[in-house]
Image (tube, grey):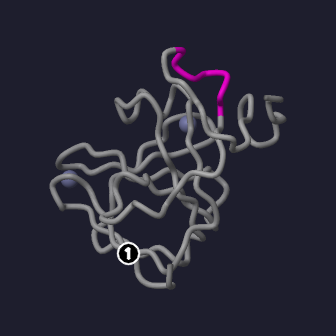
Amino acid sequence: MKEENRPGGCLCGAVRFVCDGRPIKVNLCHCQMCRKASGAPVVAWAAYERARVRFLSEPTWRQSSAKAERGFCPSCGSAIAWHALGDRAQIDLAVGAFDQPDDLKPAEHLWADSRIKWLKIEDSTPKYHEGRDSGAIDT
Ligand SMILES: [Zn+2]
Ligand SMILES: [Zn+2]
C-alpha cells in the first residue's frame, strides 16, 4: 500500500476527513461503551497522530467517560472518532467510516473480556483483557 491521503466520512457526508498515510495501529474494541456508541457488536479503530488527520468539516464532540470524548456527525449520528482527554496528539477514527477500509486490518483486540459471547474470535492477533496495559490473554 503506497502512502497516500485516505478519505472518509459519515453516512450522510456532512462530516468528512482526510488522513495522511497509514495509521499507527488498528484495533478491534469490544468494550461496552464502543458498542453503545456505535450500535455494533464490535468497533474497529484506526489510531492516527492528530496532526495527520484533517477534518474538512468537524464532528460534534461529546465527553463519553471520565477519560475520553467521542466525535459523531451532528446530522446523521454516525460514530466517527474517539480521543483520550489529555492526549491531543492522537485520535482514533472508526475504520468503518473510511471510504476504502479494506487494508485497515485490525492487529489486536482490546477489551476482549467484554466481547459479546456469540461473537467468535478466530484470528491469532493479541487479545487484551481490557486496554493494552491490562495484559494479553493466553490462547
Ligand atoms: Zn452525517
Ligand atoms: Zn471501546
Per the image, the residue denoted by label 1 is: 18
Q: Residue at point 71% right, 31% down?
A: 130
Residue 57 position, x and y percent, is: 28, 69
Q: Is residue 68 left or right of residue 102?
A: right
Structural crowding at the residue carrying mark 1, measured as other residues with C-alpha within 10 Å and reported as few (<14), some (14–19) or many (≥20): some
Which stretch appears magenta? Answer: 111-117
Between 84 and 132, which is closer to the camera in this rendering?
132
Residue 13 position (above or below residue 65)? below
69 is higher (above) or lower (below) than 134: below
Ligand 1 within 8 A of label 1's CB?
Answer: no
Depth order, front residue of 48/63: 48
Count the labels in the image. 1
Q: Image quadrant for the C terminus?
A: top right
The picture quadrant where one finds residue 100 is: bottom left
In the image: residue 126, left or right of residue 68 = right
Q: Quadrant of residue 49?
A: bottom right
The image position of residue 45, as x and y in percent, is 51, 51
123 and 95: which is toward the camera: 123
Residue drawn at (27%, 51%) of the image: 73
Kind of residue at disc 1: Val
Q: Is residue 43 above or below residue 96?
A: above
| Residue drawn at x 49%, y 46% as measured from the top left | 44
Residue at 51% from the left image edge and 84% from the top image edge: 3
Q: Is residue 105 magenta?
A: no
Q: Is residue 113 magenta?
A: yes
Quarter of the image where ligand 2 sits: top right
